[in-house]
Amino acid sequence: MPGQWYNFLPDLPGPVPEVRDSGSPSAAEIAEKVRPRILIEQNGTDQKWIPIPEPVMERLRQCGRPTPLHRARRLEQHLGTRARIYLKREDVLPTGSFKLNTAIAQAHYAAEEGRTTLVTETGAGQWGMSVALAAKMFGLRAEIFMVRCSLEQKPYRRHYMELLGAEVEPSPSLRTAIGRKILQDTPGHPGSLGTAISDAIEHALGLPGAAYLAGSGMPHVYLHQTLLGLEVTAQLAEHGEELGVEGRGDHLIACSGGGSNLCGLVGPHLRARADGADLRFLAAESTAAPRLTQGVYAYGRTDLGGFTPEVLGYTMGEDFIPPPNHVGGLRNHHSSALVSLLRHEGVLDAVAFDQRTALEAGRLLLQTEGLLLAPEASHAVAAAVEVAAKARTERREPVIVVLASGAGFLDLQGYHEVLGDTREAQVDT
Ligand SMILES: Cc1ncc(COP(=O)(O)O)c(C=O)c1O
């Protein structure tokens, strides 16, 4: 396991566009109140390698890092491809997703600063579960605003958080002014990551000793997730693989909501690509919020309460309400500045899948490899299936790395509702 995080900000294809921050109080002032200081510093650091504090290392090891890199040979055989498909298995972490990597780091910094409560938002609940566990590890309280439709679809994630002592509140929330306003303007609003971020920041602002933790979208979150890309490089070497061999069309693929599993995988490889490696980066998003494939590149906020600055990014617009599907982690209306920059500069390709196509890919992975992934991660699998099919037609033999960002056991209801009785849909293995 790497002992340092890799800061890829200097490797971006251009400067990150200025934010617009004219509110009163400004988003920067709000951030200074609610975010641990070191995390704000990590957002803009130019230090290349950042040592991981020992208490964080210890807990990451205890949780099973480094996670395995799994060669999906049966899936390859089923697809009839000579591509070599590898899955980076973040689903094996105790909370069932990669979100734990940054939750532990952020909780450590919050505790070190003397904060007593972690406040955050969560979509499908994976991030909330990770914050609840990280809070417990460092002796902190946790209060978590969970998107209402996801909370109704996935009550078990709430139960997990509550077992750890966390308080879970549906978003839009009646406890905040912004939540009440959203519900007044749009009665029955199903909630989205935009509503939940707003609820969480407003609540943290009014709670003494609170730290607001972001699950995605921010450079410090991406930094903590670079463990993914760093481990992949080392593990591929153990398989005798090197990424970026000319003419092969190697791919790194991840689903993208706020962009953290994607940036964690891709970030450490940006320099190699800029230096000419034949390496493609592919974001798989949901047609429920197809910002990178259909959005416009414009200034906007990731929350609805005006607590975050306006950033230039691919967006569906602040009025967009993503349909309440089972892919809670990809239902963002606005893409982060960094992911959008990669896309705008042509470094990142993107593809969108409806939930049925994605969950069918998830089912195929279960039937071939025996792995049940979260619906979000199944989008990345669907993308890999497409890339492998294209490589077969073009007679290429790429290495394809897919980020298996989370486990799907608590999403089985969603699989069932979308795919129905699938006894007819069995593949030979
Ligand atoms: C399992 C899983 N994968 C992916 C995501 C998307 O997040 P991000 O785009 O920040 O990687 C989420 C978000 O909740 C998730 O729970």
Image (spheres, helix red, strand yellow):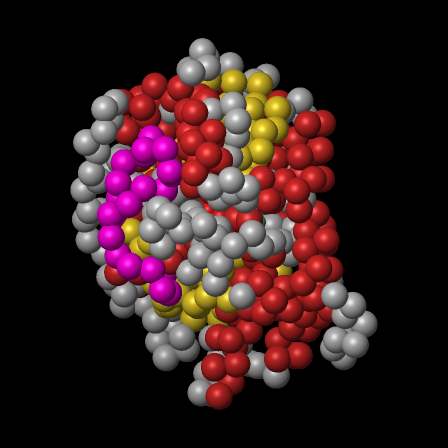
Q: Which residues are magenta?
A: 292-312
Is residue 404 placed above or below 39 in the rendered structure? below
Residue 211: image location, x then y, percent = 44, 21
Question: Residue sitting at 20 percent across and 38 percent down?
Answer: 20
Q: Position of residue 307 (x, y in %)?
A: 33, 30
Residue at image x 35%, y 76%? 246
- The x, y position of residue 198, in whole percent, is 42, 32
Q: Nearer the viewer, residue 177 or 114?
A: 177
Q: Quadrant of residue 375?
A: bottom right
> Can residue 314 be found in the magenta stretch?
no
Q: Residue at x 46, y 15 (%)?
A: 207
Whether 111 is drawn above or below 314: the answer is: above
Residue 310 falls within the magenta-colored stretch = yes
Placement of the C terminus among the 4 image quadrants: bottom right
The foreground one among 116 and 170 is 170
Q: Nearer the viewer, residue 292 or 230?
A: 292
Work out whether residue 190 can be spotted. Answer: yes
